[in-house]
Amino acid sequence: MRVMKLLGACASLWLLAGCAASVHPLCDPATAEPDKRLVGMWERRDGNEGERVSYLHIAREAKRPLDASRSEPEPGLMRCWATGHDEKSLLGDDAGGARLLSTRIGYVDYASIVIDDLAQREATVGVEPANSPAAEQSPPVDPARKPRFLLVRYDVTDDVLVVWPANQDAVADSIQSGRIAGVARAKVPRPGKLDFGKWEEVTLTATTAELRAFFEAGGAEKWFNEESKTVYHRLR
């Protein structure tokens, strides 16, 4: 699946293979503010003796608004570029990028990452900086197309960024129990076909206001567990 392939390249883009989508972000794009603490280069090392190195570059979005009717990006819209390499083989990952919105609910920080950026990765999209000539070749944005979002929790200090993606099973459980609006459809086994993962679709359909109320009431606490967290260190 193309999105999953890029999620691997963006390993790092605060995501993991099993993920749930949301029709709405956790904040209003028109009034969201950028989290300036995220701006900069971040590094993560893992694998045997840390030979796998992943990098994140986070900054303000320079060109592409979420709302195609806007001439400039929303003030709070940010962009994250992800890439990496293997220090032993010297083989590098494909670069990938996505736009995101950050918000605080209670005392916790969250980001809403635009899925469509991950799914629509053309040869020149997600590789070149937004202000480069190659980026100008990006396909036109369809005004009728509404973006979807991946929801992640994060914590950032001067030198450490910790990220927790939403656990797909936990989100599906919240939907199936009727605590939050959405669709949770399990995969149907097909003879002769190996299916990875339990779910065919897990999509939150709750509005931004409903999502925030659910989070404020502690309903999403089990969505973000310690097993899935990723830690990055700032490069200076």
Image (cartoon, grey):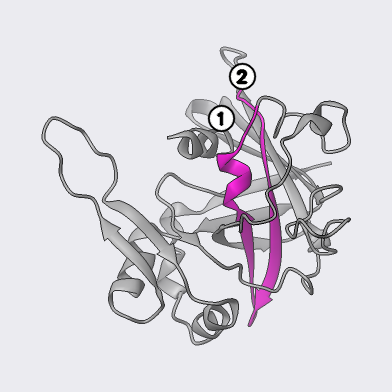
Q: Which residue is mark 1?
A: 50
Q: Quadrant of residue 90?
A: top right
Q: Residue at x 88, y 36 (%)?
A: 131
Nearer to us of marks 1 and 2 is 2
Which region is colored magenta? 93-122
Could you say where residue 125 lies in the image, as x and y percent from the top left? 70, 33
Q: Is residue 167 left or right of residue 211?
A: left
Disc 2, SS: loop
Q: Is residue 86 in the magenta section?
A: no
In the image as oriented, which residue stretches furthest toward the left?
Answer: 191
Q: Earlier in the sequence, mark 1 or mark 2?
A: 1
Q: Residues within 10 Å of mark 1 (few under 14, many from 20)?
A: few
Please report contact status of discs 1 and 2: CB closer than 8 Å, yes or no: yes
Q: Is residue 100 in the magenta section?
A: yes
Along the line of sight, the residue nearer the viewer: 172 or 51: 172
Could you say where residue 109 lies in the image, as x and y percent from the top left? 65, 69
Q: Which residue is mark 2?
A: 87
Q: Residue at x 85, y 64 (%)?
A: 75
Q: Is residue 187 left or right of residue 162?
A: left
Kindly identify which numbered label has been placed on residue 228. none
Along the line of sight, the residue nearer the viewer: 12 or 24: 24
Which image quarter is the N terminus in?
top left
Could you say where residue 227 lies in the image, as x and y percent from the top left? 41, 54
Along the line of sight, the residue nearer the viewer: 12 or 174: 174
Q: Residues within 10 Å of mark 2 (few under 14, many from 20)?
A: few
Which image quarter is the C terminus in?
top right
Q: Amino acid at mark 1?
A: Gly
Disc 1, SS: helix
Q: Is residue 78 left or right of residue 212?
A: right
